Image: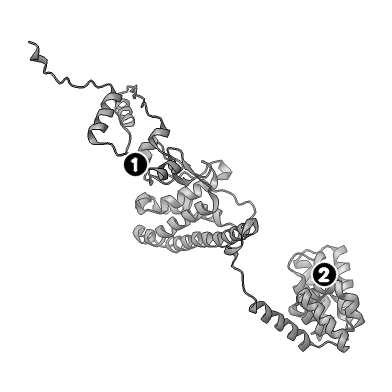
């Protein structure tokens, strides 16, 4: 333990610390009592070592969080490492205190023992009882042997553990590592944007080349972490990710990443800087914030940033929020006949009323289940059969085989 050479300088150092950390007067008096004890300890016995750790723990509860070591260094002349060791002795060896005091285990040995596992501590106590003493090298040898034994044991792959315990273990790995990589990719995108913003001229293609693939990856990672899977409601043989609840914050994060995934979705050059500063950066800050309740951009005014997504999705992918249209038009990216007629009619100030003949085939007949699809091959209709079905469902009369003038 290192003591400050000039003891008279300690009160002034303590006064500066107390003022800087706004320590109340009643707390200050308790801390000063603890400081006097810590300073007065010279040659420590096993009992005093535990008392020292106890006093440090008490001081930690009185001081602002994370300032104990600074206080102990400035006020009492301790080193930060010594403070950590004494607290570890009190916390980790308290249940063995009586036997360790009886065996008169020295402070240095206690410091080494405080880092051991319970089995190692008990083994060391047994050795001390047998030999009448315990040395630092004895504790070190016990800890090294335990480490070698653990390394020699066959390691069980968590992906081989069955039951709920095994499933929970691999889910925990997924969440731990998945969040880390997802946030890392968002921060990577943010770093490229921060690098580009101070420049007078932002090169759109250059920035997109650096970020669009990472944005696509991050969006898929978000889907993997936060979304469930479900059968496609329009095609039950296809399984896709169920979309995040629409108009929610994380849904908008996913939509923004979708938009950033293609340079064609980015705003024009004259609007690029505004988009990056007012929409992209604030949303990325919100998503990567370590605060408990980060404020959504524009939440003060009740306005959330809007993200315009192009209607270009894969047929086996969920429809992003904000994409409108019939299932067929969404899947193909092409407006349906009904939608195009409505648009044309609206241009002339009219309303198009369209009656589409209902198919006699139910959805279950059109799309087989997975089990049905695997149990028997589907029947391929000939072109003539397809044309005939379309005509019959549309009410188109078949041409008579006899020419109109044949009866004349």
Q: Which residue is drawn at 51% across and 53% down?
A: 224
Classify the position of the N terminus by image quarter: bottom right
Where is 282 relative to 10, above or below? Answer: above
Q: What element carries label 2?
A: helix
Using the image as rendered, state which of residue 358 and residue 259 is in the foreground. Answer: 358
Q: In this rendering, does residue 334 appear at all?
A: yes
Q: Mark 2 points at which residue?
A: 57
Pointer 1: residues within 10 angstroms few (<14), some, or many (20+)? some
Q: Which residue is drawn at 85% across and 64% down?
A: 27
Q: Tag 1 or tag 2, which sits nearer the N-term?
A: 2
Q: How is the image coloured?
A: one colour
Kindly report the distance in space between the C-alpha atoms of the residues bearing marks 2 and 1: 65 Å
* Nearer to us: label 2 or label 1: 1
Q: Name the residue under label 1.
A: 333
| Residue 52 point in image, percent of width and height | 86, 76
Q: Which residue is drawn at 40% across and 54% down?
A: 261
| Residue 328 point in image, percent of width and height | 36, 37
Q: Residue at x 64, y 78 (%)?
A: 151
Report which quarter residue 307 is drawn in.
top left
| Residue 252 point in image, percent of width and height | 50, 46
Using the image as rendered, state which of residue 214 and residue 346 is in the foreground. Answer: 214
């Amino acid at each position: 333990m290192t003591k400050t050479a000039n003891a008279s300088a300690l009160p002034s150092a303590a006064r500066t610390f107390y003022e800087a950390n706004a320590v109340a007067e009643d707390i200050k008096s308790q801390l000063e009592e603890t400081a006097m004890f810590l300073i007065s300890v010279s040659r420590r016995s096993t009992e005093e070592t535990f008392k020292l750790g106890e006093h440090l723990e008490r001081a930690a509860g009185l001081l602002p969080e994370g300032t104990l070591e600074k206080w102990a260094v400035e006020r009492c002349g301790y080193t930060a490492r010594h403070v950590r060791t004494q607290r570890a002795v009190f916390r980790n060896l308290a249940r063995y205190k009586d036997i360790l005091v009886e065996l008169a285990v020295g402070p240095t040995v206690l410091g080494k023992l405080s880092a051991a596992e319970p089995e190692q501590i008990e083994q060391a106590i047994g050795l001390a009882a047998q030999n009448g003493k315990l040395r630092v090298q004895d504790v070190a040898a016990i800890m090294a042997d335990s480490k070698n034994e653990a390394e020699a044991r066959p390691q069980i792959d968590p992906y081989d553990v069955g039951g709920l315990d095994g499933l929970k273990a691999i889910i925990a790995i997924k969440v731990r590592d998945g969040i880390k990589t997802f946030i890392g990719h968002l921060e990577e995108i943010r770093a490229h944007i921060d690098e580009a913003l101070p420049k007078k001229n932002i090169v759109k293609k250059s920035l997109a080349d650096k970020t669009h693939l990472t944005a696509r990856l991050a969006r898929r990672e978000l889907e993997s972490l936060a979304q469930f899977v479900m059968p496609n409601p329009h095609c039950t043989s296809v399984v896709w990710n169920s979309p995040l609840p629409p108009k929610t914050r994380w849904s908008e994060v996913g939509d923004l990443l979708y938009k950033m995934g293609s340079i064609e979705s980015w705003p024009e050059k004259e609007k690029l800087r505004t988009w990056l500063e007012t929409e992209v950066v604030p949303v990325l800050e919100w998503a990567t914030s370590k605060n408990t309740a980060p404020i959504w951009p524009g939440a003060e005014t009740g306005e959330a940033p809007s993200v315009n997504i192009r209607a270009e999705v894969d047929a086996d992918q969920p429809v992003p929020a904000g994409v409108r249209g019939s299932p067929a038009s969404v899947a193909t990216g092409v407006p349906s006949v009904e939608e195009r007629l409505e648009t044309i009619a609206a241009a002339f100030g009219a309303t198009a009323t369209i009656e589409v003949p209902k198919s006699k085939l139910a959805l279950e007949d059109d799309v087989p289940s997975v089990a049905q699809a695997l149990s028997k091959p589907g029947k391929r209709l000939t072109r003539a059969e397809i044309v005939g079905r379309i005509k019959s469902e549309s009410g188109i009369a078949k041409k008579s085989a006899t020419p109109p003038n044949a009866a004349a």
